[in-house]
Image (cartoon, rainbow, N blue to C red):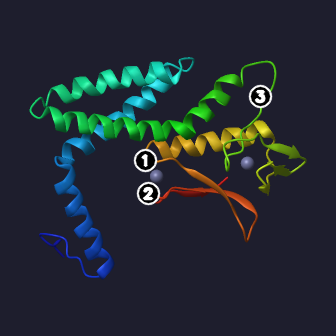
Amino acid sequence: MSSPQSPVYRTPVEQKRHAQDVAKRHRTGMPKLRDMLREKYRKRIIETRTRLTDANRTVQLAELKEFLRTELSEFDKDLELEQNILDELLSDVNEWYALGEQNLETYVESDAPIQQNVLCPVCLIKPLQRQETVYRCECGIQFEHTSNMEQLERKIHQQIASHETKCTQALRFFIEPSTGRLYNMCGSCDYFSSI
Ligand SMILES: [Zn+2]
Ligand SMILES: [Zn+2]
């Protein structure tokens, strides 16, 4: 069977989504350029973070901003559009860092002789406390896990990193009520996983 020339939007949900996409495309302009840059940017940020494990976010952002400006200058036609794209991508990155940076910090600190606290992945404010296989946080969450603190932290970090290779939105962690276990999901892509 050959594929249709153009997609058909059958259900009201699909039609609505399509209409929203079209409206957004009109509003934002040059979606291909934006998508292409976002994809490049994702790869670049991972490279930068791997290389500059001891650098802080300001240094990394400065470097990435420079990279973006260079990329955008090749399309030096519409300065306002260029600035809009730059602003939008940088705000993506800030959001992305909000979760990732916490993890990067604990990752870097794990070489230190004193074991650092592992931040609660749900509230991202208080440290996790462990009592045998039960983890708790002052924010009120509680879940069971057989891993020790270090292993758990590594698992959380791995999932964040895995999601980050495909998506710029922050992964959210939550306790699934029926099982009482720690899960994560993304509201933007289909990423969903238990820890
Ligand atoms: Zn918490
Ligand atoms: Zn996602």
Label 2 and label 1: CA atoms lie apart by: 7 Å
Q: Residues within 10 Å of mark 3 (few under 14, many from 20)?
A: some
Residue type at mark 3 is: Gln
Q: Secondary structure at mark 1?
A: loop
The residue depicted at 60 percent of the width and 41 percent of the height is 158
Q: Are marks 2 and 1 in contact (CB under 8 Å)?
A: yes
Disc 1 within 8 angstroms of ligand 2 (CB): yes
Residue at x 13% of width, y 31% of height: 75
Image mark for residue 116 = 3
Residue pictured at 56% horizontal, 40% vertical: 99
Cα separation between marks 3 and 1: 28 Å
Name which residue lies at 48% across and 59% down.
187
Dot 1, how many residues are within 10 Å of its Cα: few (below 14), some (14-19), or many (20+)? some
Residue ID for mark 2: 189
Q: Using the image as rendered, state which of residue 34 and residue 191 is in the foreground.
A: 34
Image coordinates of residue 95 in percent, x first then y, are 47, 41
What element does badge 2 sit on? loop
Considering depth in this image, is 87 or 51 the residue closer to the camera? 87
Q: Position of residue 143 (x, y in %)?
A: 79, 56
- From the viewer's perspective, is residue 23 above or below residue 166? below
Label 1, on which residue? Answer: 167
Quadrant of the image occupied by residue 152: top right
Is residue 174 shown left or right of residue 16? Answer: right
Choose the circle earlier in sequence order: 3 or 1: 3
| Mark 2 residue's CB less than 8 Å from ligand 2 | yes
Q: Is residue 193 above or below residue 179?
A: above
Q: Residue furthest right?
A: 132
